[in-house]
């Protein structure tokens, strides 16, 4: 009963779907009531699963992992979340093992009901964790043929692109030879046919293009050029500008991105990169950077990379409370956490919240 009362009080704080826009006080109150609910009934799965979701949104995946660990074998949804969390905290072998244990269950669910969209998405993500990206892509392609509406099709295409990007990155990590990079670029070109506007894909292409710049392999140069030529001119300038930005070539990056943004002012990744470019300048025009960042967020308000950029800009503008809201939202992306936690610590220090600042520094030292 006391567990249900605490859950009810947590729900009065706000709708979890809008967690990213909550104030620090709302987040603190929500976390307090969820923690109390879990304490009052440690065997109850519901408060645990909600608390894990909150911890993930806050970027504390290690604590989420530890909290759910004891309950992972009691519930299929918890087991799925555990596989995802194991991957997020860097326990790749455990994630693959847990995923392999669940793959068959979700595959059976799809065989019983091929129209089960959510189960298909989970099945595909588990296949990726288990290292079978090809089968994941096949499952998602079958889902596209059965999709009920455009929203489902968009989710399936996004998942397909993400699976290809993961597979491409994995190949580059395992083998840094020119031949492996060539295969990786071909995979990314395949992904472009599915969705040439996917922000993560464009970033992966830019990174791959950077890796080819020092190579004398003629095939790599041809494929790199075909990737750039295979998209519209504005996107090509975006890719080249992002590659230059990643290399620290600010002048070249500015030229390409300015051309692209002049003709295509609505591309979120382009707007975000332009904001990042301005932020890297010695005397940045923070107001312009913020306008660009907010324009990018209008079409993708929950994209962690875009929220991180705006958070960094707001921090530089000394708008610390607003910056914290964006940066904490972006903590759900592990690759962003190191820079975010450093800024968060300084933001909390500026607000006089030294204990929270120290906690951010502790987490940074633990590489979470």
Image: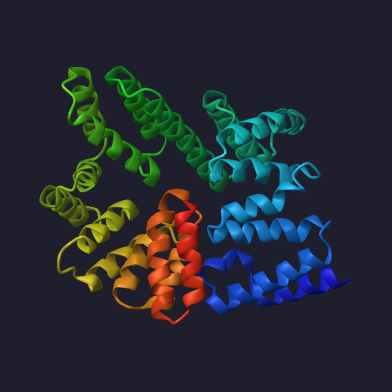
Residue at 74%, 76% (x, y): give it: 9
Question: In which quadrant is the N terminus drawn?
Answer: bottom right
Q: Position of residue 22 (x, y in %)?
A: 54, 73
Horizontally, residue 312 falls left or right of residue 62, namely left
Q: Is residue 204 above or below residue 172?
A: below
Residue at 65%, 33% (x, y): give it: 99
Instruction: Tell me which corner region of the image, top left, top right, bottom left or bottom right, holds residue 147.
Output: top right
Q: Position of residue 243 (x, y in %)?
A: 22, 42
Q: Position of residue 4 (x, y in %)?
A: 83, 69
Q: Residue furthest bottom?
A: 352
Horizontally, residue 128 falls left or right of residue 77, namely left
Residue at 41%, 25% (x, y): give it: 174
Q: Is residue 253 above or below residue 183?
A: below
Residue at 57%, 79% (x, y): give it: 25
Q: Is residue 54 above or below residue 216?
A: below
Instruction: Tell me which corner region of the image, top left, top right, bottom left or bottom right, holds residue 348.
Output: bottom left
């Amino acid at each position: 009963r006391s567990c249900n009362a605490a859950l009810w009080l947590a729900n009065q704080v706000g709708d979890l779907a809008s967690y990213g826009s909550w104030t620090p006080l709302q987040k603190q109150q929500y976390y307090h009531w969820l923690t109390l609910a879990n304490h009052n009934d440690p065997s109850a799965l519901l408060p645990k699963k909600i608390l894990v979701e909150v911890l993930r949104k806050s970027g504390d995946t290690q604590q989420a992992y530890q909290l759910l660990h004891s309950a992972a074998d009691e519930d299929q949804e918890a087991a799925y979340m555990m596989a995802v969390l194991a991957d997020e905290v860097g326990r790749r072998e455990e994630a693959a093992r847990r995923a392999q244990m669940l793959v068959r269950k979700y595959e059976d669910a799809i065989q019983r009901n091929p129209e089960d969209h959510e189960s298909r998405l989970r099945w595909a993500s588990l296949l990726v964790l288990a290292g079978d990206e090809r089968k994941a892509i096949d499952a998602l392609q079958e889902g596209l043929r059965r999709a009920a509406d455009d929203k489902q099709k968009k989710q399936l295409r996004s998942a397909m692109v993400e699976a290809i990007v993961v597979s491409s990155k994995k190949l580059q990590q395992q083998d840094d030879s020119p031949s492996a990079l060539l295969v990786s670029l071909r995979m990314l070109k395949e992904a472009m046919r599915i969705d040439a506007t996917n922000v993560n894909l464009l970033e992966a292409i830019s990174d791959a293009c950077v890796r080819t710049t020092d190579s004398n392999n003629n095939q790599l140069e041809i494929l790199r050029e075909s990737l750039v030529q295979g998209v519209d001119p504005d996107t090509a300038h975006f890719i080249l500008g992002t590659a230059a930005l990643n290399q620290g070539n600010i002048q070249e990056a500015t030229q390409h991105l300015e051309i692209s943004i002049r003709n295509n002012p609505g591309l979120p990744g382009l707007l975000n990169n332009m904001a990042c470019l301005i932020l890297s300048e010695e005397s940045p025009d923070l107001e312009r950077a913020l306008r660009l960042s907010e324009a990018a967020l209008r079409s993708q308000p929950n994209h962690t990379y875009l929220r991180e950029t705006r958070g960094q800009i707001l921090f530089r503008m000394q708008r610390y409370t607003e910056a914290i809201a964006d940066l904490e939202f972006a903590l759900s992306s592990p690759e962003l956490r190191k820079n975010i936690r450093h800024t968060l610590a300084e933001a909390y220090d500026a607000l006089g919240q030294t204990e929270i600042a120290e906690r951010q520094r502790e987490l940074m030292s633990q590489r979470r």
